[in-house]
Image (cartoon, rainbow, N blue to C red):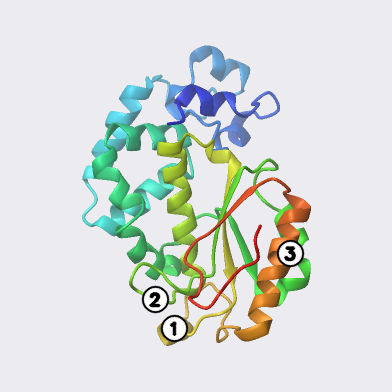
């Protein structure tokens, strides 16, 4: 498990101050910033005056978690916590691992994928859509963090018993990589969830005015395999040595070795 100290130490905060620091989930300590840190990083006035320990933060976060009425709402809460304070997110999961893991990943992640466009809040990972197939290296360069150890990628077609969810399948790599950090000790800022958006054959998604993916029937056959190959070659070029794991790709897909 990645410890809070390891996560904070993994990135330099010397060039981040004020709201820029508070908006960086891997470095943000929220109310746990000390008085000295608040002075050094220009945080006075941006946070409540009382400083908390991490244990106190966890207790307060769990109290808020318990007030959610459904598993989907609890999933949304945990994802929001992950997007604001990753140290607190992972500590809460670690303290209550049996209770939290079914909400971060299976089975609740299936519902989260189904409702992805309706519960979307903040960007995480990369969306690589078929219409931008000739710009994949540029898309990879837009990744949130330069150094990446593990990529998990899906095309959103085979999602935990509920089938084709299109771009909503990104919830699978997000959830899976969260567990890799929680249990496997991989630094969260060195993971990258990706969805290959090749359209969807889910009529409900295509009719949904809030659907956020490419509104087109799925690309199949040689065009699909060529797109997957373009992606693999771009990863080799931009992120050589990175572990690339395939998750929930279509049954007929046999992606090239990475």
Tell me which numbered mark, 3 or 2, is placed earlier along the sequence. 3
Residue at 47% across, 81% down: 209
Above or below, 156 relative to 246:
below
Q: Position of residue 135 (x, y in %)?
A: 77, 67
| First along the sequence among labels 1 and 2 | 2
Q: Secondary structure at mark 1?
A: loop
- One can see residue 45 in this view: no
Tell me if residue 134 comes above or below residue 241 in the rendering. below
Q: Residue at x 41, y 42 (%)?
A: 81
> Dots 3 and 2: beta carbons under 8 Å?
no
Which numbered tag is attached to residue 136? Answer: 3
Question: Where is the C terminus found, in terms of image quarters?
Answer: bottom right
Q: Is residue 114 visible?
A: yes
Task: Estimate the x, y position of residue 15 in percent, counting from the top left.
Answer: 71, 27
Look at the image and tell me in which quarter the N terminus lies: top left
153 and 216: which is toward the camera = 153
Residue shown at 44% from the left, 51% from the top: 176
Distance between mark 1 and mark 3 Cα atoms: 25 Å
Dot 1 corresponds to which residue? 202
Q: How many marks?
A: 3
């Amino acid at each position: 498990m990645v410890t809070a100290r390891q996560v904070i130490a993994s990135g330099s905060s010397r060039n981040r101050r004020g709201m820029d620091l508070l908006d960086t989930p891997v470095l943000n300590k929220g109310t746990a910033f000390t008085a000295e840190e608040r002075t050094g990083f220009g945080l006075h006035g941006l946070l409540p005056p009382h400083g908390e320990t991490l244990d106190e933060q966890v207790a307060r976060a769990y109290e808020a978690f318990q007030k959610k009425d459904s598993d989907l709402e609890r999933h949304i809460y945990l994802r929001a916590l992950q997007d604001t304070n990753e140290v607190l997110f992972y500590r809460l999961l670690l303290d209550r691992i049996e209770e939290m893991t079914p909400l971060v990943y299976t089975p609740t992640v299936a519902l989260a994928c189904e409702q992805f466009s309706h519960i979307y809040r903040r960007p995480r990972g990369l969306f690589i859509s078929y219409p931008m197939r000739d710009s994949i290296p540029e898309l990879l360069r837009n990744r949130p963090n330069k150094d990446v150890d593990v990529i998990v990628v899906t095309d959103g077609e085979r999602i935990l018993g509920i089938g084709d969810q299109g771009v909503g399948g990104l919830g699978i790599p997000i959830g899976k990589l969260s567990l890799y950090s929680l249990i496997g000790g991989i630094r969260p800022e060195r993971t990258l969830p990706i969805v290959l958006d090749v359209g969807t054959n889910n009529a409900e998604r295509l009719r949904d005015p809030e659907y956020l993916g490419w509104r087109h029937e799925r690309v199949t056959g040689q065009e699909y395999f060529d797109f997957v190959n373009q992606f693999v070659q771009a990863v080799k070029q931009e992120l050589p040595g990175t572990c690339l794991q395939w998750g929930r790709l279509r049954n007929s897909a046999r992606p090239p070795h990475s």
